[in-house]
Amino acid sequence: MTVSLRFGVAHDFRCPAGSPYSLRDVYAQSMEQITELDRLGLDLVWFSEHHFLEDGYLPAFVPVAGAAAVLTTRMRISTNISIVPFHHPLRLAEDLAVLDQLSNGRMEFGIGLGYVPKEFEGFRIPIQQRVSRTEECIEILRLAWSGQPFSYHGKRWDFDDIRVTPDPVQPGGPPLWLAVSSEPGVARAVRYGTHVLPQGPRRLLDNWRASTRAAGADPTAQRVGIIRTCLVTDDPERDWPPLRDAERYRMRVYSSLSDAAGAGGRATFDDPERITQRVIVGDVDHCATELISFIREFELTDVVTWGSAPGFPPAAMMPSMERFTRDVLPLVRAAIEQP
């Protein structure tokens, strides 16, 4: 079984100090962009999550996912990723079920463990509990969306005779994704049978496919998604430098977060075999050629581009996003999906 190819846009709603626009502008422009890209036929929108960052990095996906659900008619809506240890699993199950109702069954949910010590300290959650909290949350979400009362007794959560309402539109609830950045992450994704968001070297993706087959399942029945930005331009010398500066800021912030996480976080970030997320810059044919090669090399099903960057607002990215959706993607689909 092979699932269909999908493309999307990602937003994290950031406004660095000194920007010539406000955070309100970022939210307004992001929603305008999402609405227009939905009209143009883009498949997905993904939202991210971090906490306590000065540039306003999106800390709460539920409100913006609700807004997107109302403003769009076809896009599927997800996270890459939501930091599950910070969420109460019953409230999360309710929120996602409501979002699934609002969107008429278009919600998905990407899950991460989190890795930034300051975030765990802020929520008074021991970082050592991130794995157990994540795994128990996955189990509780699936029970909560079963349509039946349930009880659950784990290390972190304990419930008796709970019936979560409303039911989601999608039977069994929104499809789940897991970020995979380590061998334990590979095992977790196989055990729970989720889609995967690879955030590490190629070997993890290869091991996930091999382990899925060994468990008696078909990896081609699952989705593999990643963020990789395309800047579609006929004049890279003019258009790339401002986005390059914004992407350098983005990487400095992620680098500082990885440094704070210690050797493990930095090792994942700096791994020379990490699947590339380098920005693709060029005209329509160049972007299409690069995307086709990228998708084939890693057998990807979902590729999402940032719809803005910190210091490069959604309105500035919109001309590229229009060409990406209208001109690049038909070429990519024709090449990948041909018999």
Image (cartoon, rainbow, N blue to C red):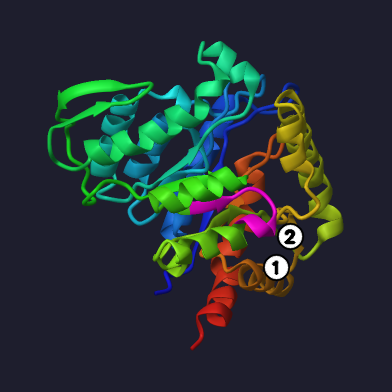
Residue 85 screen position, x and y as percent: 46, 26
Which quadrant of the structure image shows residue 100?
top left
Q: Amino acid at mark 2?
A: Ile
Identified at 45% across, 48% down, the residue is 177
Query: Measured along the vertical axis of the image, is residue 266 above or below residue 54?
Result: below
**In the image, 286: left or right of 128?**
right
Q: Is residue 298 magenta?
A: no
In this view, 323 is above or below 109: below
Q: CA distance from mark 1 to mark 2?
A: 6 Å
The secondary element bearing badge 2 is classed as: strand
Q: Are marks 1 and 2 in contact (CB under 8 Å)?
A: yes
What residue sits right under mark 1 in the picture?
A: 287
Q: Residue at x 56, y 22 (%)?
A: 128
Is residue 115 left or right of 137 when viewed as pictured?
Answer: right
For residue 280, which numbered disc appears in the image? Answer: 2
Image check: 168 left or right of 260? left
Comes first in the chain, label 1 or label 2: 2
In this rendering, the count of numbered labels is 2
Q: Residue at x 54, y 39 (%)?
A: 29
Q: Please tell me how crowded label 2 is: few (under 14), some (14-19), or many (20+) other residues with Cα within 10 Å.
A: some
- Lateral position of residue 257 relative to residue 207, left or right: right
Compared with residue 280, is residue 146 higher up or lower down, i.e. above or below? above
Q: Which residue does the image show at 46% across and 66% down from the upper left?
A: 213
Percent x, y for residue 306?
A: 62, 48
Query: Residue 264: in sight, yes or no?
Result: yes
Q: In terms of image quadrants, where is residue 12?
A: top right
Name the foreground residue: 246 vs 188: 188
Q: Where does the magenta region start and end?
A: 196-204
Q: Residue furthest right?
A: 237
Badge 1 amino acid: Cys
Classify the position of the N terminus by image quarter: bottom left
